[in-house]
Image (cartoon, rainbow, N blue to C red):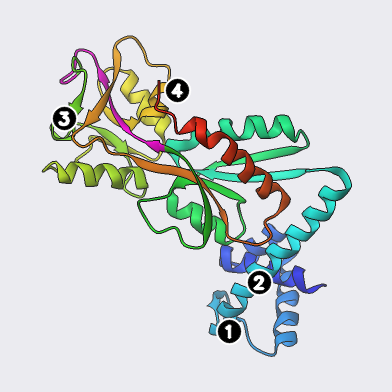
Amino acid sequence: MDLITKLEFLLALSRERHFGRAARACRVSQPTLSAGLRQLEDQLGVPLVQRTSRFQGLTADGERVLVWARRLVADSRAMRQEIAALKQGLTGRLRIAAIPTALAMVPLLTTPFRATHPRVDFAVLSRNSSEILALLEDLQIDAGLTYLDNERLGRVTAVPLYRERYRLLTARDAPLGDREVVTWTEVAQIPLCLLTPDMQNRRIIDQLLRAAGSTSSPTLESNSMIALFAHVQTGRWASVMPSRLAQMLRLMERIRSIPIVDPDAAHMIGLVVPRRDPMTPLVTALVRQAEMIAADLELPPG
């Protein structure tokens, strides 16, 4: 069993926090995983795992080794991918996680990318901003689409793509439904359905409503933009959504998308990838694709 395989076991155990689940994630038996970890401890001469009848966490030495494990495993994967690309061009899978408000923008990246590199496929996940950063660190995704300017990002390389602005989606015959623009103070006065508090979009909206002298007290919360949109489409609910997402949705005739001003708030959405040199060939190509479309995405919504 080589060193990289054992480090993969350590990464899986740190992530899953359970020997059985870690073994399944690595597609080995639990005895094989346990034996590999003990061999790694013997090689390094320090205990890495706190053991009782079940997993209790990593030791202090284990946490330090984990930092190196992420780096070495990432470099090993990058080397294998680069050698494969030299032989047969870009191939493999790109794993992308996006915040719910940016999911609809992912095809703007993946569609032209696949047209250029038809042997690459994709896995696209919906996650909140904190989960995206954690998945990047644990090598579970290759890239994320998230906010760049509202909360701390950590060690990532970021490509700014577009600014997220906000609109009130509400029925024409509902309060404020006949307006051309509305203010955050006015929005604060009506019942809303919003994303759950673990979502950065919700935290941004809460901040804007507090600045307008109110607090959000939504009548419905969900971690899915589709669920919020479905409720708005009934004509009985209102919500705050990003302008670009509102443009992409098929609004029924009785639903309006109204710009929210005073302030005209905006937050930058961008692609984030692990800060590594060199990047993997797939991530390098994805960053180039993001840079190519960034200028068009930053144009004001039509």
Residue under numbered circle 3: 190
Read off the residue under disc 2: 69
Location of mark 4 (residue)? 248
Residue 132, placed above or below residue 218: below
Instruction: Name the amino acid type tagged 2.
Output: Ala
Return the x and y of residue 232 as percentages of the image width and height.
Answer: 31, 23
Answer with left or right where residue 151 lies relative to residue 188. right
Q: Are marks 4 and 1 in contact (CB under 8 Å)?
A: no
Separation of marks 4 and 1 at Cα, in angstroms: 50 Å
User: Which residue in the rendered view is the most extreme toward the top?
Assistant: 253
- Figure quadrant of residue 5: bottom right
Give the extent of the magenta segment.
163-176
Real-space Cα separation, disc 4 to disc 3, in angstroms? 24 Å
- Give the image quarter of residue 89: top right
At label 1, the amino acid type is Asp
Q: What residue is shown at x 29% (from left), y 28% (from top)?
A: 167
Residue receiving disc 1: 61
Q: Tag 3 or tag 4, which sits nearer the N-term?
A: 3
Secondary element type, mark 1: helix
Dot 4 or dot 2, earlier in sequence: 2
Three-letter residue code for mark 4: Met
Q: Which residue is at 25% across, 17% downward?
A: 171
**Circles 2 and 1: CB atoms closer than 8 Å:** no
Q: Residue furthest left?
A: 213
Whether residue 202 is situated above or below residue 33 in the rendered picture? above
Q: Hey, what amino acid is under mark 3?
A: Ile
